[in-house]
Amino acid sequence: MVFDRDIARFAVGVIGNVIALILFLSPLPTFIRIWKNKSVQQFSPIPYLATFVNCGLWVLYGIPWVQPNSILVVTINGTGLVIEIVYLALFFLYSDRKLRTKVFLVILGEIIFVATLAICVLSFVHGNKKRAAIVGSICMVGNILMYASPLAVMKLVIKTKSVEYMPFFLSLFSFLNGVSWTAYALIRFDAYILAPNSMGTVLGLAQLLLYATYYKSTKRQIAERETKGELVMAEKSVTGAAQKPRNDSRV
């Protein structure tokens, strides 16, 4: 049986689409928590801002006028773009004024950047190879930023010895996404997809190792907070009961 690279690449690309979709949806528990608490707490907007611009850049890379035969790149990144818009809208809604302003300015800057790049490349650069080289190089940087964006969260994890604010499924599917798109890029060599996704595989693995290292200490910290909260509530109840007879005697 002859190995057909195009069929294999398409099959791996479909798998990559499924994994990437799960990756985009993996922060859902985080945003449900934000919605319930009406606060973003210590969650960082950086991963979602990085993913937003990254998806926009890869949609531009995958269109026929830049890189033909890359429909799978467009479908998943177009879907991811819509999902990130929803996430950032929730983040914007439940942030304080200072953070909300920062998020808005970054989003505006990213939209202007991608739109300007698209207009310049499609208007002034001729030929798919040149367009793919320019957009692909920028996509590499954007993809690396997306994969590296949890570094700030990883720093917080090491500092606090807690993975509470580093969602497990986001880390897991970042790793799997990197693996699948690395394989996709190797079947029919594409350096622009290979470089950032191989780096993403390493960073995703690093996050999983951090999670394994600090999982037990996180559980312990949460249990201590809950115990402390129960003790405070008990103290308030005792204090209230002690003060009540005094109030009655004054009447």
Image (spheres, rainbow, N blue to C red):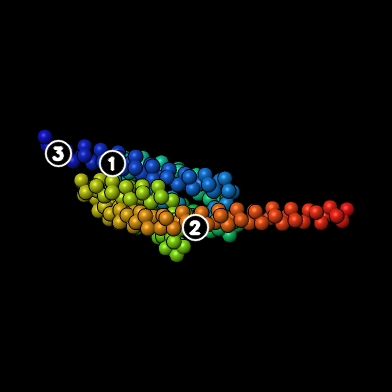
Q: Earlier in the sequence, mark 2 or mark 3?
A: 3
Three-letter amino acid code of the residue under disc 1: Gly
Instruction: Read off the residue under disc 3.
Output: 3
Q: With respect to residue 15, does 93 lie above or below?
A: below
Q: Point out which mark residue 213 bears.
A: none
Residue drawn at point x = 57 percent, y = 51 percent = 39
Task: Give the answer, above or below, for where 228 lies relative to 30.
Answer: below
* Vertical comparison of 193 with 79: above or below: below
Above or below 16: residue 96 = below
* Residue on which the image places disc 1: 13
Q: Position of residue 221 (x, y in %)?
A: 49, 57
Per the model, the C-alpha gap separating discs 1 and 3 is 16 Å
> Residue 125, can we see it?
no
Q: Which mark is residue 221?
A: 2
List x then y, in percent, for residue 98: 58, 60
Mark 1 Cα shell of 10 Å, populated few (<14), some (14-19), many (≥20): many
Farthest residue, direction right: 251
Among the 4 quarters of the image, the one containing residue 158:
bottom left
Is residue 221 at all visible to an observer of this figure?
Answer: yes
**For the N terminus, which image quadrant?**
top left
Discs 1, 3 touching: Cβ within 8 Å: no
Callout 2 secondary element? helix
The reply, left or right, for residue 133 in relation to residue 110 is left
Cα separation between marks 2 and 3: 53 Å
Look at the numbered disc 3 and give the secondary structure of its residue.
loop
Q: Residues within 10 Å of mark 2 (few under 14, many from 20)?
A: some
